[in-house]
Image: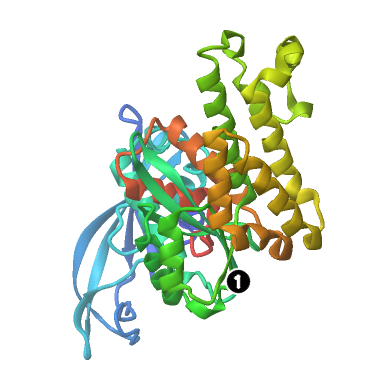
Amino acid sequence: MRDVDLFQQALGLQAPWRVERTEFDAPHRRLDIFLDFERGATFACPECGATGCRPHDTTEKTWRHLNFFQHEAYLHARTPRVRCTTCGVRLVHVPWARPNSGFTLLFEALVMAMVPDMPVAAAAALAGEHDTRVWRIIHHHVDEARGRADFSKIRRTGVDETSSKRGHNYITLFVDLDESKLVFATEGRDASTLDGFRKDLEAHGGHAEQIEEFCLDMSQAFRAGLARTFPLAGITFDKFHIMQLMNRAVDEVRRQEQKQRPELKGSRYVWIKNPENLTPRQITMSDALHPRRLNLKTVRAYHIRLSLQDLWSHRGDEADKFLKAWYFWATHSKLEPVIRVAKTVREHWDGVLRWFQTRMNNGILEGINSLIQAAKAKARGYRSTRNLIAMAYLIAGKLDFTPLPT
């Protein structure tokens, strides 16, 4: 079999395209494959699809292809511009690459398979390309896949933010809790993010009225945005965020008290972890503090914390009564950080108790946040928020890249 026949079959070329010749440069580790079309061939108009269009002229195009063993491979083709009676002169689309790309579809498919599992810079170095060109591939296919997404069946949505870089820089994530997938990510963490989600939802076949429930933290900005953009949706406040507020309050009490009680220094995790999750060292520290427990404000805050956590183990018909008793205890504790949390719970009372109807939480979002932050740390950050959002979709969006070859 001649080399041109071998590459003809390997590339899967069909008439009127054929391999004309190849050039192999071993010292420079490069293979060039030259393609051409048969004399007298006609093509479809790339704009209107009309068939039988004859070439008007040709232009030379080059695409980076998958490596041939350790050698870089490039396809070259005399690409025709056809004259369409309706659209005029147009450059045809070749079957091995998308329009306006310098890469073949197989090369882009390889890139898209690598980047969810390694930093883009590493994937680019492995491919022998600049990472800027690789990011262009990623953005194109992420945007294409999201453009095909159907959001008409989303009913329950989780909302949370994650940091995009050091300082107060965040992106907000919207997750379909039933499908466990990221459906929308946007810069910021204010009420305008809800406007962005509604527009994106409508652009993908959905509408605001179909969203029955939101699960989120107690952010005033998110609540204001929901009241304006999704007024019919119910709100469940995430129990993990509620306990996070309580943990911070307990630690604040500890930090205030350790100024007079130095034995509390270094005991932070003794008070914000559940007893069954303590390490042997933390258990030893807890036992050492035991004789003084009744005199420690931190111990009182800790027991109030454990009581609040017990809320979600009650039946729904008992929850309101239990929470009222807890609220009385917390507000009469004389512990200012604990009192602030109790008042916050009072302001969000209905959304806290709504959990007993919906059983919703943002555990899925916490997992997605962890994956995004791990990818960001591995890449040592991203040059732009747009890049971070694209990576978030790759990691958690369950996007369909079916048009790419496998």
Vertical position of residue 404 compared to residue 386: above or below: below
Disc 1 element: loop
Q: Residues within 10 Å of mark 1 (few under 14, many from 20)?
A: some
The reply, left or right, for residue 91 in relation to residue 189 is left
Q: Position of residue 281 (x, y in %)?
A: 72, 12
Q: Total label count?
A: 1
User: For residue 19, what is the image quadrant?
Assistant: bottom left
The reply, left or right, for residue 371 in relation to residue 65 is right
**Three-letter amino acid code at the position of disc 1:** Arg
Vertical position of residue 88 compared to residue 241: above or below: below
Specify whether residue 2 is in view: no
The reply, left or right, for residue 207 in relation to residue 91 is right
For image coordinates 35% across by 62% down, the residue present is 192
Q: Residue under circle 1?
A: 155
User: For residue 321, what is the image quadrant?
Assistant: bottom right
The reply, left or right, for residue 99 in relation to residue 57 is right
For image coordinates 47% across by 70% down, the residue present is 148
> What is the quadrant of the C terminus in the image?
bottom right
For image coordinates 27% across by 61% down, the residue present is 100
